[in-house]
Image (tube, rainbow, N blue to C red):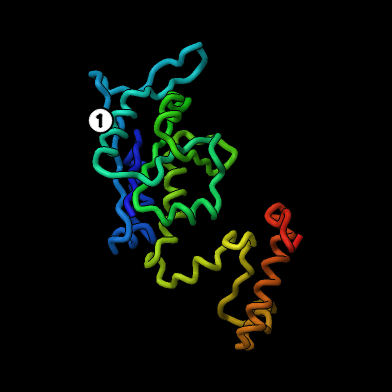
Amino acid sequence: MRIDIITLLPELMDSPFSASILKRAADKGLVEIHFHQLRDYSTNKQNSVDDYQYGGGAGMVIGIEPISACIEHLKSERNYDEIIYMTPDGKTLNQGIANSLSMCDNILILCGHYKGVDQRVRDKYISLEISIGDFVLSGGELAACVVCDAVIRLIPGVLNDESSALSDSFQDDLLAPPVYTRPAEWQGMKVPEVLLSGHEAKIETWRHDQSIERTLKLRPDLLKDSEFE
């Protein structure tokens, strides 16, 4: 997979991709991440990319011309399965979206700033708009990192045990069950006996029941219209 990210602050994104799972994925050749400084596509001496918005109001808007120049340049080199814009009014990221994106070959992500981008960019180029929650960040970079992390970990070969991702929360619209490790007893608190039994069928049944119970308690909205409601 190749992910191209258009940003005004590529340095803000260095750290997430230089450690842990994302770095290992790149080292294995399973994913390529490329940052593109939007100011490089500015045509003025100041390398500015923003301007006042028509109609007045506070806040600047990123103009269409540098974004168009950057996207057209990248599109001339490859086809993109999705061109994504990170925006608070986009579709809220969930596991289903991450699963779908993990099957793409090429993804392009545009990070917004200020009051956003000229609407014509969204109308002409964007195929998917994503938000990571009902709040506003200073820019789309951190949100783009969240999307990349959620997607890249699902690519076959990234995790040492690929079955681990299949048991994550939200994969089956349920929260993951509680997990335990050694010691079996700590300060009088014991690991559930079933997990020590070695009986795989009973363990799987217990985990499924716990997932339903936790979801009903913590995220009942996930069970709407489901058989567990």
Q: Tell me the quarter of the picture where residue 189 sits.
A: bottom right
Q: Which residue is outermost to the top?
A: 55
- Identify the residue position indicated by label 1 in the image: 40
Which residue is located at x 43 percent, y 60 percent? 153
Q: Which residue is outermost to the right?
A: 229
Left or right: 99 in relation to 37: right
Which residue is located at x 23 percent, y 18 percent? 45
Where does the image place residue 193, in percent across and percent down from the top left?
Answer: 68, 84
Q: Nearer the viewer, residue 137 or 50?
A: 50
Which residue is located at x 43 percent, y 24 percent? 120
| Secondary structure type for disc 1 | helix
Of the 4 image quadrants, the one containing the C terminus is bottom right
Where does the image place residue 114, in percent across and percent down from the top left?
Answer: 45, 26
Left or right: 130 in relation to 62: right
Q: Tell me the quarter of the picture where residue 127 sits.
A: top left
Where does the image place residue 39, in percent across and percent down from the top left?
Answer: 29, 29
Q: Tell me the quarter of the picture where residue 53 sits.
A: top left
Which residue is located at x 63 percent, y 68 percent? 177
Q: Nearer the viewer, residue 218 or 109?
A: 109
Left or right: 58 in relation to 15: right
Residue type of the residue flagged with mark 1:
Asp
Give the answer, above or below, for where 48 lies relative to 216.
Answer: above
Of the 4 image quadrants, the one containing the N terminus is bottom left
Where does the image place residue 88, in percent across and percent down from the top left?
Answer: 54, 35
**Would you call the spot at circle 1 few (<14 residues within 10 Å), some (14-19), or many (20 or more)?**
some
Give the answer, above or below, for where 45 lies relative to 218.
Answer: above
Q: How many marks?
A: 1
Give the answer, above or below, for where 229 lies relative to 132.
Answer: below
Give the answer, above or below, for where 180 lies relative to 114.
Answer: below
